[in-house]
Image (tube, rainbow, N blue to C red):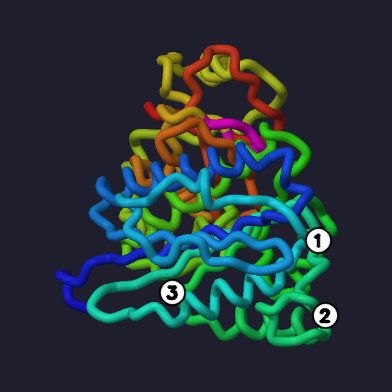
Amino acid sequence: MSGSQNYINHVALVLDASSSMSHLSGKVVEVADQQIAYLARRSRELDQETRVTVYVFADKVECVIYDKDVLRMPSLKKLYRVGGMTALLAAALKSQRELAQTAQLYGDHSFLTFVLTDGQENASHRSPDAPSRDPRELVQAVAEMISTQEDNWTLAVLVPDQMGKREAMQCGFPKENIAIWDATSTQGLEEAGQVIQQATEKFMVGRAQGIRGSRAVFSTGADAVNEDTIKAAGLAPVDPSKYQVIPVARDVAIREWVLESGHTYRTGCAFYQLSKPEKIQAKKQIAVLEKKTDRVYTGPEARALIGLGAVETRVKPDHNDDFTIFVQSTSVNRKLVSRTRLLLML
């Protein structure tokens, strides 16, 4: 493809508007509007054209905004109304089928859809938007659709619990494209918005490196961090004489361990191994270590690799046989965990 072809992102939000969402309806609008403002800002910064589609679903599935320039989007305030049951499968099918009719001429087009639901499917078999009245056939139809989507399609879903995750997996959603959110509170919805933003950041930065779609939008594991994605992100290996990897023998404060290991402690020189879910501030650097060689990669692109944007974001370490993620520490008494490793920039 010639370098002059522009990147065109088609981002869709498919929002549950069933009655059980009524206690969150104001917050849904706020979070969706924030996501759109964020998309607008990143589209300018990365010089990517972004077009937004919004579906709302209850008993019926309704497209309230179709493929509109993100810089001209209205607020969803007047467009999001709750009431009815949850036609989740019909919403997945209708949104993807209609988006598939979007012209993909002259440009590098990519489709990213987030479905947000607070409950289980219970109405698609009665929905006028579903191709079948048989619930099993509907599950089959969604699984088939997902398995045949081209490589420039990414479909992700946020569900309220493990049961929702199991159902989404039965419908063929890739495991790393399913996230669980707390549907009981506005705080939970706020966090779901951050998860969507983090996934979008990873998607848009990946686009700039020629990645067209993802089956691991919510992951920091092997699907997200591997040789290919590191190369695509343009991460450079650090000169081996500039760092040292030190095993951590006990639970200990970070400065104490650096000094005990015979080094001088300077604020920001030490990186701890990401070993539990935590919030990472916008200013913290990220380093990625290849386990078999101890080669270290860092740079601003390392943050984008795990979906970190310009705001504090919660990240969980997913299983990865080949790479370990390290986070810069700016505190002297950050607790290091026994049997992890410490990365020291010399």
Tell me where the magenta segment starts and ends, as one range: 273-280
* Rendering coords of residue 94 (x, y %): 59, 76
> Residue at (43%, 49%) from the top-left corner?
201
| Camera sees residue 321 | no
Mark number displayed over residue 135:
2
Quick check: 192 above or below 222?
above
Quarter in which the C terminus is drawn: top left
* Rendering coords of residue 44 (x, y %): 25, 48
Single out the mark in the foreground, 2 or 3: 2
Q: Earlier in the sequence, mark 2 or mark 3?
A: 2
Tell me whether the residue at label 3 lies in contact with that at label 1, contact meaning CB atoms closer than 8 angstroms: no
| Mark 3 closeness class: few <14, some 14–19, many ≥20 residues within 10 Å | some
Is residue 277 shown in magenta?
Answer: yes
Could you tell me the amino acid type at mark 1?
Gln
Is residue 225 shown in magenta?
Answer: no
Mark number displayed over residue 152:
3
Q: Which residue is mark 1?
A: 120
